[in-house]
Image (cartoon, rainbow, N blue to C red):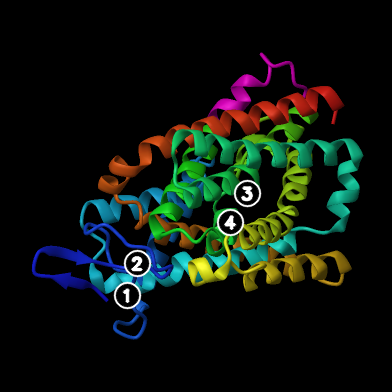
């Protein structure tokens, strides 16, 4: 609840306990309003996002969803009656989308990848994650924001940011900025990477490996690789193998932060593995059994894409331009540098290993 004195504007606290600037909206309190109006608005925006994608296939629905949410909040259409529903979408739907993403994975992807491909994936993720955090420190980006950007760029965009959010312990601005950056750079990749294929001397299979190892979101990877005939299958295999590293990265980071920041000093300790990330691992195990029929897996994939787009509409309503102007400059530089880093390391890996 807002805290006021006679001499200061209301200050809100996010669910993590961090102080927020007076211009930030309060985190919605479930029970005070119905989520239905907000969820209906999210459903409408999600339908528009997929409609735009159907008309212009090169435009990813996730990108449209974030843009719709951001436009709505910045022109005053995000009415308080919608806040609870958009909050539910941005948190619960995103976590469910992460769990369902696990059903697209399986041990067979790792076997199809081979040792050289696995080396490229592990090296790219490790260098990008570590390098982005170091760059964030040099640029003076807050640690939580730097951690979320590093996770999103090194693994799988918005889904990875969601998985790391509880461990990072930042506020909702940190999440919104990280989501905006991975969405922006992933969308640019759809346009730019196919144009670079011939100058960089990549055949379709090598291009697919490069895209799978460097583009953030699964949907953005598909959209990018699909522009070059013969690249899509390799790109998807490499990308999904990269996503498998999400849970180990979250758990490893949580362990490191627990050791570095005792609970007595902070009042809380980051969870070793958020519950929905455990669900993601369980979904991978189920998919690896081969017991689920193809129609069920296809339905889960479609539902995952819809839930992700709906969640990104909700997350888009957290992108306040005044906040970005005040806090996003250094983060933008970090995001662009991380994008160059992941693309450069992945390209070098593909060229050196022939993966």
Label pair 2/4, CB-CB below 8 angstroms:
no
Left or right of residue 254, residue 106 in this image:
right
Which residue does the image show at 28% across and 67% down from the upper left?
A: 12
In this picture, is 110 found above or below 42? above
User: Looking at this view, is 295 or 309 the one in front?
Assistant: 309
Q: Which image quadrant for residue 190?
A: top right
Q: Extreme front residue here?
A: 264
Q: Which is more foreground, mark 1 or mark 3? A: 3
Q: Which image quadrant for residue 3?
A: bottom left
Which of marks 1 and 4 precedes in the sequence?
1
Q: Which image quadrant for residue 212?
A: top right
Question: In which quadrant of the rendered image does the C terminus lie?
Answer: top right
**Can residue 190 be seen in the rendering of this structure?**
no
Label pair 4/3, CB-CB below 8 angstroms:
yes
Q: Which is more foreground, mark 3 or mark 2? A: 3
Q: Which mark is residue 156?
A: 3
**Disc 4 target residue:** 159
Which of marks 2 and 3 precedes in the sequence?
2
Label pair 1/3, CB-CB below 8 angstroms:
no
User: Looking at this view, is 223 or 335 the one in front?
Assistant: 335
Element at label 3? loop
Element at label 2? helix
Element at label 1? helix
Q: Extreme bottom residue here?
A: 31
Decide whether residue 199 is among the magenta residues: yes
Residue 200 placement (x, y as % from top left): 69, 16
Decide whether residue 119 is among the magenta residues: no
Label pair 4/1, CB-CB below 8 angstroms:
no
Q: Which residues are magenta?
A: 190-203
In this picture, is 113 found above or below 308? above
In 3D space, how far apart are the residues under numbered discs 1 and 2 (Cα atoms)? 6 Å
User: Looking at this view, is 130 or 57 the one in front?
Assistant: 130
């Amino acid at each position: 609840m807002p805290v006021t004195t006679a001499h200061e504007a209301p200050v809100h606290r996010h669910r993590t306990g961090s102080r927020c600037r007076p211009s930030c909206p309060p985190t919605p309190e479930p029970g005070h309003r119905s989520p239905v109006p907000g969820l209906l608005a999210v459903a409408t925006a999600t339908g528009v996002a997929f409609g735009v994608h159907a008309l212009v296939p090169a435009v990813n629905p996730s990108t449209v969803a974030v843009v719709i949410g951001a436009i709505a909040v910045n022109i005053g259409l995000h009415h308080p009656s919608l806040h609870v529903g958009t909050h539910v979408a941005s948190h619960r739907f995103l976590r469910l989308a992460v769990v369902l993403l696990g059903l697209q994975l399986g041990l067979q992807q790792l076997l199809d990848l081979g040792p050289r491909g696995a080396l490229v994936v592990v090296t790219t993720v490790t260098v990008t994650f570590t390098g982005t955090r170091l760059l964030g420190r040099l640029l003076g980006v807050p640690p939580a924001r730097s951690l979320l950007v590093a996770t999103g760029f090194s693994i799988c965009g918005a889904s990875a940011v969601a998985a790391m959010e509880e461990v990072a312990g930042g506020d909702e601005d940190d999440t919104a900025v990280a989501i905006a950056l991975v969405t922006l750079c992933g969308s640019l990749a759809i346009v730019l990477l196919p144009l670079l294929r011939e100058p960089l001397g990549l055949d379709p299979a090598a291009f697919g490996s490069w895209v799978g190892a460097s583009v953030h979101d699964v949907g953005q990877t598909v959209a990018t690789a699909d522009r070059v005939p013969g690249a899509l299958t390799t790109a998807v295999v490499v990308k999904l193998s990269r996503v498998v590293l999400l849970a180990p990265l979250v758990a490893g980071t949580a362990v490191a932060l627990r050791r570095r920041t005792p609970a007595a000093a902070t009042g809380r300790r980051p969870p070793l593995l958020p519950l929905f990330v455990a669900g993601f691992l369980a979904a991978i195990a189920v998919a690896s059994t081969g017991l689920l029929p193809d129609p069920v897996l296809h339905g889960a994939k479609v539902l995952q894409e819809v839930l992700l787009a709906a969640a990104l509409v909700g997350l888009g309503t957290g992108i306040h331009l005044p906040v970005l102007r005040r806090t996003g400059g250094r983060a933008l530089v970090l995001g662009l540098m991380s994008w160059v880093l992941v693309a450069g390391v992945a390209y070098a890996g593909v060229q050196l290993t022939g993966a």
